[in-house]
Image: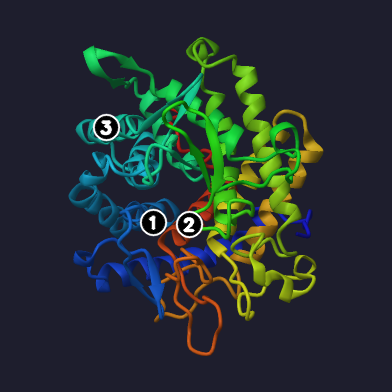
Amino acid sequence: MIIDSELSPAGLHQKINGLWELSASKIMEIRDHYDDSRGSPVFTVKGKYTTRGWTEWTQGFQYGSAILQYDADHRDEFLEYGRQNTLEKMALHLTHMGVHDHGFNNLSTYGNLHRLMVEGKTSFNEWEKHFYELSLKVSAAVQAARWTDLPGGGYIYSFNGPHSLFVDTLRSCRILAVGHQLGHSLKGENDLHISLLERLISHVLTTAKYSVFYGEDRDSYDIRGRTAHESIFNVNDGNFRCVNSQQGYSGYSTWTRGLAWAMAGFTELLEFLETVKEEELSSTGSKTEIEDTLLKAARATCDFYILNTPTDGIPYWDTGAPGLLHLGDYLNKPSDPNNSFEPVDSSAAAIAAQGLLRLGRYLSARNFEKDGKKYWSAGLTVVNHLFDDPYLSRDPDHQGLLLHSIYHHPNAWDHIPQGSKIPCGESSMWGDYHARELAIYLLRIIRDEPYYQFFITQ
């Protein structure tokens, strides 16, 4: 990508406001016309949200979007829509034992509602605050129970089973950090105390070791910074066996949304570690060693994204997708969502941009100003193109906010419009939510409001 070093959050204010104006109407359109009895809205088909029964991982993004909208424009109707539906419909997600998506669903709803109350953006109610905190504690413990032990560590396993580590779980397992901050833990057999922080750190270190490639040692044959969607382990002896991919082209190419989850996940957890005392990490290694591991992974993944994304910062769905060869020198021109060979994934861009921005801020605060400026400007470059045509959905009849999102290309779940050879022109609930999250991140900086973080800072 070509990084525009002249961009600033203030210079993007008009585009950010334009996104929120569109966002409000999209949320109300879904509220008024989507039939919730069909299941959670997942992605659009011909501009209308539909569902896809796999796991219920997007409902929190639906109601969390309304809560973020309230954060942006302070309109009570969005707060009440998000709050009431969180109360009525999200309880099942708290105790869902079958998924690795607790941070996605429950931090987006209970977590955002708790954050707004702590910040004083909503009226304070002690029992309501306790309700949010209890919900976050329960979600964290249930997520932590989905555990595979490895020699010297372990990981939260995916819905594929105990052998399976997904790179995207990195950002969902943030819920363990909040549970730990609230003083909670998981209880095992014979009242065994299981630290949520210890499981979080072990999962993060395992992900950094096996899901990210560094072009050295074990993966000297590979490219620095690329990620594998899935890592497979022998659960009998804990040995790593191979890489795999569920939603990407292969285990030996990089599914760009998985890459983006890693970029955002590592950088947010670096920020969280700033709140953790050294003595809390006595069982997982020194704080400095953990931070170094996370920073190495964050730098590698963000560098890979910058080097392997078209000039506008919007990636194709997989860096090894076979049709890319027909696009010529595609990395030296803007992405083309209407080409005839491979789809782009705008949702990956929305997630990745936040990772770039957070890494840039983190490094600048530590006097690595040149590198910090690079990543910060790269994130703003993505925003500059993503919050504009052809990616913002300006059609009032289209329920999506961010166009050209891809869900599961290998399973052919994405809609291919008439006259096209590839999926394009549609939206996803996670893409729309993360576009809003990216917009609130920058809007709060422009307004000089508290820095947007998933964890508790007050």
Q: Are marks 1 and 2 in contact (CB under 8 Å)?
A: yes
Q: Position of residue 343 (x, y in %)?
A: 58, 71
Quote the CA–CA distance across marks 1 and 2: 7 Å
Frontmost residue, 315 versus 252: 252
- Residue 65, label in figure: 1
* Residue located at (26% from left, 45% from top): 93
Judged left or right of residue 143, residue 191 is left
- Residue bearing the label numbered 2: 436
| Disc 2 element | helix
* Residue located at (35% from left, 47% from top): 105
Q: Position of residue 436 (x, y in %)?
A: 48, 57
- Residue bearing the label numbered 3: 138
* Residue located at (80% from left, 70% from top): 329
Looking at the image, is mark 3 or mark 1 nearer the viewer? 3
Q: Earlier in the sequence, mark 2 or mark 3?
A: 3
Mark 3 closeness class: few <14, some 14–19, many ≥20 residues within 10 Å: many
Q: Earlier in the sequence, mark 3 or mark 1?
A: 1
Mark 2 closeness class: few <14, some 14–19, many ≥20 residues within 10 Å: many
Judged left or right of residue 414, residue 384 is right
Q: Are marks 2 and 3 in contact (CB under 8 Å)?
A: no
Q: How is the image coloured?
A: rainbow
Q: In the image, what residue type sits under mark 2? A: Arg
Looking at the image, is mark 2 or mark 3 nearer the viewer? 3
Q: Earlier in the sequence, mark 1 or mark 2?
A: 1
